[in-house]
């Protein structure tokens, strides 16, 4: 039996490149934009990698929400599949990258429990692309109340890659006093990025790539937080509660950004010089889209940076680039379907799609 | 026309009725004018609000569709679990020209800042927040519309009622009473003419009798 070398990226990247080749190209998007209705788009998707999930969705009904869930199932299936291509340190790095989905799933569970949402409804929003599988997540979601769900997370998470229970225990008292779920969410966010950074301490090129990606992600969150909270009267000690560590923006720089009242001041802050180009692009479409323009442009910037990581064929960069291509593909498909659903014309749909030259779409 | 007794007392009663009806009609016309003066700006305001509601709803639908497209429907749904809330309204009352009108005001503004939506802003995109902003604006406009539309509805009903009353007085009651008055006056005039004729006849007969008596004496 031939031993497949799972501890480096050679084999995995070959498989991932094959997956990349199966991603939709510009012509496929063109046909979908030209499609006369959603049925025609679904017919086109049935001939792609999305076939199993789309067939399942068609049985449930063809509503955009069901198709969204099908896309998320496809994303989870593909990302979990990639994890099987590697073992050892590469798998740990990949786990750190995919942990964002665990964070999202746990937050969704807490939100659902807080809002007294039925378990079946909470279960529909899960994207089990990280370490936590659907069974574990549903077990947490089926607890009678948020307190029991947190207790279970605390118990279960002792064996997880990221022990999220600690973040929740740490802020439980404050949550019980204030009854504000955002306290727990902020604690989870902050703990997540600190822990992920701990997981990627290595100085090898792969760890550096993952670190770079996480750093941009964290910076973008901090920039967006400063932009969204500008104009709100907030004491500096409260402002720092929104700070996420792990990016290029330090805590004192973040405090400075949070103290700025005007959009232009934030945009031109010297600490954000690395993000000048996406911020300027966001400013150009601010009149039309408002603050969403900055989010769109910064997201594009992150994707562009991650797609650029695939230069070294024997690094995790190939996998990271694939993941973001896949993410971008799903976003574009959703834009097309939702756009058609609300009656947008082709040119309007194209304007909302993520089009990057590096991605070839 | 209703049959009436062509008597002088009836004439007096009808004349007093007509004068009362005319007075009432004038009062109602004044009320109608006052209501119209209140009503017209409310129509403008209602039109303005309904246009605003239409625009805000269209924007909200677009923002929601884009949030669902770019962040995915389940992610938006997840954020919505955390941000459930209630819109509080205060309902009091006032009177416009004697018409009781409920006054609906926002108990607490439905427009929340991004830190008050239940979720942490570090975990939810600007697109989701922007859609939430728009939908909160819809609630805000709906509350304003509820107040102004209730006012419009109540004043409209009162205006219609007043108009109907003015028309009834002007076109039915007053003309009918006037016709009855004319009928009685004509009847009374006729009766007076008959009386004069009869009295003249009696006078002539008496004068003839007197002439005959004088002739016999001579």
Image (cartoon, rainbow, N blue to C red):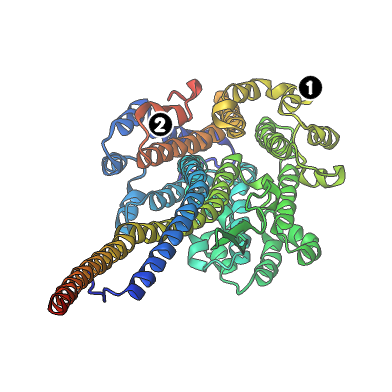
Q: Earlier in the sequence, mark 1 or mark 2?
A: 1
Residue wearing tag 1: A270
Q: On residue A174, which mark appears?
A: none
Residue A75 horizontal/vertical position (percent): 47, 46
* Corner quadrant of residue A231: top right
Between marks 1 and 2 in the image, the one whose residue lies nearer the viewer: 2
Count of labels in the image:
2
Q: Secondary structure at mark 1?
A: helix
Where residue A218 sits in the image (x, y, percent)?
70, 38
- Residue depicted at x 26% and y 76%: B5
Residue A127 can be seen in this image: no
C-alpha distance separating marks 1 and 2: 35 Å
Residue B145 as seen in the image, left or right of residue A187: left
Asked whether A295 or A120 is in front, the reply is A295
The reply to whether residue A272 is visible in this rendering is yes
| Letter of the chain that mark 2 sits on in the rendering | A
Q: Which residue is mark 2?
A: A349
Query: Which quadrant, please, contains the C terminus of chain A?
Result: top left
Q: Please rate how many residues cluster around mark 2, counting C-alpha atoms within 10 Å: few if below 14, some from 14 to 19, many from 20.
A: some
Q: Residue at x 60, y 34 (%)?
A: A295
Please, is residue A2 above or below residue A156 in the view? above
Pointers 1 and 2 in contact (CB under 8 A)?
no
- Give x and y (percent) for residue A359: 48, 25
């Amino acid at each position: 039996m031939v031993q497949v070398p799972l501890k480096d990226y050679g084999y995995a990247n070959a498989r991932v490149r094959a997956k990349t080749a199966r991603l939709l190209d510009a012509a496929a998007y063109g046909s979908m934009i030209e499609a006369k209705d959603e049925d025609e788009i679904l017919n086109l998707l049935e001939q792609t990698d999305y076939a199993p999930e789309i067939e399942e969705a068609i049985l449930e009904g063809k509503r955009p929400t069901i198709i969204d869930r099908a896309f998320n199932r496809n994303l989870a299936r593909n990302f979990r599949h990639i994890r099987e291509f590697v073992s050892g340190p590469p798998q740990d790095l990949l786990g750190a990258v995919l942990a964002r989905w665990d964070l999202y799933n746990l937050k969704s569970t807490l939100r659902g429990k807080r809002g007294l949402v039925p378990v079946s409804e909470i279960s529909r929003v899960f994207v089990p692309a990280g370490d936590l599988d659907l069974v574990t997540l549903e077990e947490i979601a089926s607890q009678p109340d948020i307190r029991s769900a947190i207790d279970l997370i605390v118990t279960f998470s002792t064996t997880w890659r990221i022990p999220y229970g600690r973040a929740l225990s740490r802020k439980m008292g404050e949550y019980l006093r204030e009854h504000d779920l955002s306290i727990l969410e902020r604690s989870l966010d902050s703990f997540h990025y600190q822990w992920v950074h701990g997981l990627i301490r290595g100085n090898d090129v792969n760890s550096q790539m993952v670190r770079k990606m996480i750093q941009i992600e964290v910076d973008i969150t901090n920039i967006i937080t400063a932009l969204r909270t500008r104009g709100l009267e907030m004491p500096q000690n409260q402002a720092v509660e929104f700070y996420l560590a792990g990016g290029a923006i330090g805590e004192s720089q973040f405090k400075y950004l949070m103290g700025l009242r005007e959009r232009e001041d934030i945009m031109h802050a010297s600490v954000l010089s690395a993000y000048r180009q996406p911020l300027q692009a966001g400013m150009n479409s601010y009149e039309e889209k408002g603050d969403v323009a900055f989010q769109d442009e910064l997201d594009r910037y992150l994707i562009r940076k991650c797609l650029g990581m695939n230069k070294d064929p024997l690094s995790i960069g190939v996998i990271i680039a694939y993941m973001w291509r896949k993410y971008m593909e799903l976003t574009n498909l959703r834009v097309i379907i939702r756009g058609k659903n609300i009656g947008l014309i082709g040119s309007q749909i194209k304007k909302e799609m993520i089009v990057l030259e590096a991605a070839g779409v | 026309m209703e049959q009436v007794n062509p008597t002088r007392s009836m004439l007096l009663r009808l004349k007093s009725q007509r004068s009362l009806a005319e007075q009432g009609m004038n009062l109602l016309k004044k009320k109608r004018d006052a209501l119209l003066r209140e009503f017209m700006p409310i129509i403008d305001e209602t039109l303005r609000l309904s246009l605003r509601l239409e625009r805000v709803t269209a924007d909200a639908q677009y923002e929601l569709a884009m949030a669902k497209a770019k962040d995915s429907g389940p992610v938006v749904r997840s954020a919505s679990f955390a941000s459930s809330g209630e819109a509080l309204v205060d309902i009091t009352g006032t009177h416009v020209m004697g018409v009781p009108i409920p006054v609906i005001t926002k108990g607490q503004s439905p427009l929340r800042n991004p830190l008050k939506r239940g979720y942490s802003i570090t975990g939810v995109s600007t697109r989701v927040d922007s859609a939430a902003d728009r939908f909160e604006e819809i609630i805000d406009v709906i509350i304003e519309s509820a107040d102004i539309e209730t006012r419009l509805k109540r004043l409209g009903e009162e205006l219609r009622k007043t108009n109907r009353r003015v028309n009834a007085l002007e076109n039915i009651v007053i003309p009918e009473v006037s016709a009855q008055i004319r009928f009685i006056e004509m009847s009374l005039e006729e009766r007076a003419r008959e009386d004069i004729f009869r009295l003249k006849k009696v006078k002539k007969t008496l004068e003839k009798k007197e002439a005959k008596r004088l002739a016999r004496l001579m």
